[in-house]
Each structure stands twice: as structure tokens, then as C-alpha cells.
Amino acid sequence: MRKRIVAGNWKMNKTYEEALSLVSEIDNMVRDEVNGDVTVIVAPPFPFLQSVGKLTQGNDLMHLAAQNISEHDSGAFTGEVSASMLKSVGTEYVIIGHSERRMYHHEDAQTLYKKLKAAIAQGIKPIFCCGEPLEERDADRHFEYVGKQLHDSLSYLSNEEFDQVTVAYEPIWAIGTGRTASSQQAQEMHAYIREQLSRMFDAEAAHNTSILYGGSCNPSNAQELFAQPDVDGGLIGGASLKSRDFTDIIKSF
Ligand code: PGA
């Protein structure tokens, strides 16, 4: 069964106290207002993972994600955080391949593949991001571009490994810009992604994979986006930092 998912990517925002009050507010609102048919994920910065995870432990709808993971298991990799470390503090999901990591940290397809493997080996579920820059869309090469991103990092996984993966389509021109993809643009890309996945993996796995939309998703546009047949939820940046907006997005299914 395809899961409905709303994930909040906090990026490099909030102090410890602010993070705890944000997650407490979200936790309370989700308990009071959200029915049981949605998976809510919060991805705070590394130092807050354990405390945020503890606060949401009693809430079955809420799950903990990291924003990054090392492709290495352990050893002399200063500043890196391994899959087993993340697992040991209760991390269930990890965002891999976000455009900001591809761009500012030069993470290439091969590195992302290794990160996918490292996460899955520890039982952490990857949220794999893909999405084209504006010039690729303007040149009408967006399908090809995203297809290549999927192929270059995901296609080497086994069917069993792929079963653990959620995909997020995040057109770069829509991230943090206030310019959302239209529901039609999102749907046609999500359908294309699902078709590509069905060529790489078995058809049932592709059918059951949740594909999230990300890029200026907010309480006013979430309902229309989530109503599309191949849009199974959202990966939310800016609006996930406000408990009311994030909860309203969760309630948009
Ligand atoms: P945004 O970010 O919602 O602020 O556009 C989305 C993301 O980068 O995951």
C-alpha cells in the first residue's frame, strides 16, 4: 500500500529550545487534529535528533528523519555522521540527494547511491530527492534530467532495497522561491517518475512507492497538489518551521 506522507525538512534552522517547542506544538496539533491515515516526518538538524525523537515517541503518526548521512560506516571521517549512529538515536528516515547537498556539497550520483546503501543496511528509510533546475525545464529537458537522476543512483538497488525508498520530486526553481509547480506539472512528472521506477524495479514496487512533491508547498496549495493521483504527499521546507502551517498541510489530504 502506498503511504501518504508529509515530511518537514527544517534545514539549518532553529536553536535547541526552538526546535523542542516547534516539535511539541506539532506533536500536540497532530494528536488533536490529524486522523490516522498519514505518516508525519520531522527532519531536524543532527544535534536535536535524539531530543526531538523522544518528544514524539508516544505519537504513532510521527517519525524522525535525518537530513544527511555518511556513505561510510565508521572511522576517520571528521564531521560525518554514520547510519549506525543515526539508528542508535532513533532515526527512521533520512533525506538523501537534496538539491542543496548536490549543489553546495557536490554530492554526485555515485555518492548518493552509497548513502542509499548505507541507510538501508541499517534499516533507515531513504527519502531520495530529484528535480531539475530552471534551465532544464525551460529547454524542455526536465523529464530526461530527472530520469537520469533516478537511473544513476537508484537503478543499482535490488527490489528489496528499493522497497524502503520514498522519492521526492523537488524542482529546484520551486524550492524556497514561492513559485510552486502547478498541480498539473507535478502530476505529469510524478507519473513519469513512477513509470521510470516500474522499468527499474517490479511494477508492484513502483506502484507502492510514495512520491512526494517539494518546493514552496504551503497550506494554500497543498490540497490541490495532494489531490493528484501520483502525488502521495509533500516534502516541506519553509512551511514546516511553523507548526500551524505544517499541520494544515498535513490536513490537506
Ligand atoms: P521549500 O523547501 O518548501 O522551502 O520550498 C522544500 C525543500 O527544500 O525540501
Image (cartoon, rainbow, N blue to C red):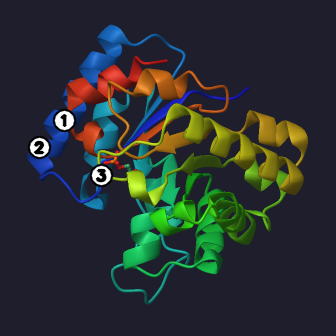
**Residue 194 sits in quarter:** top right
| Front label number (3 vs 2) | 3
Residue drawn at x 49%, y 52% is: 170
Which residue in the rendered view is the most extreme toward the bottom? 76
Classify 246 as above or below 181. Answer: above
Label 2 environment density (alpha carbons within 10 Å; few <14, some 14–19, many ≥20)? few
**Residue 241 sits in quarter:** top left
Residue drawn at x 71%, y 49% is: 193
Residue 8's mark? Answer: none
Residue drawn at x 72%, y 40% is: 191
Classify 57 as above or below 166. Answer: above
Q: Secondary structure at mark 1?
A: helix
Where does residue 146 sit, x and y in percent of width and height? 64, 61
Q: Is residue 40 left or right of residue 150?
A: left
Amino acid under disc 3:
Thr
Q: Is residue 60 visible?
A: no
Where does residue 69 sit, x and y in percent of width and height? 47, 67
Residue picked out by circle 2: 18
Where does residue 44 sit, x and y in percent of width and height? 30, 50
Q: Secondary structure at mark 2?
A: helix
Label 1 environment density (alpha carbons within 10 Å; few <14, some 14–19, many ≥20)? some
Q: Is residue 250 visible?
A: yes
Asked if disc 1 and disc 2 are in contact, CB closer than 8 Å, the reply is yes
Amino acid under disc 1:
Leu
Residue picked out by circle 3: 177
Residue picked out by circle 1: 22
Q: Quadrant of the N terminus?
A: top right
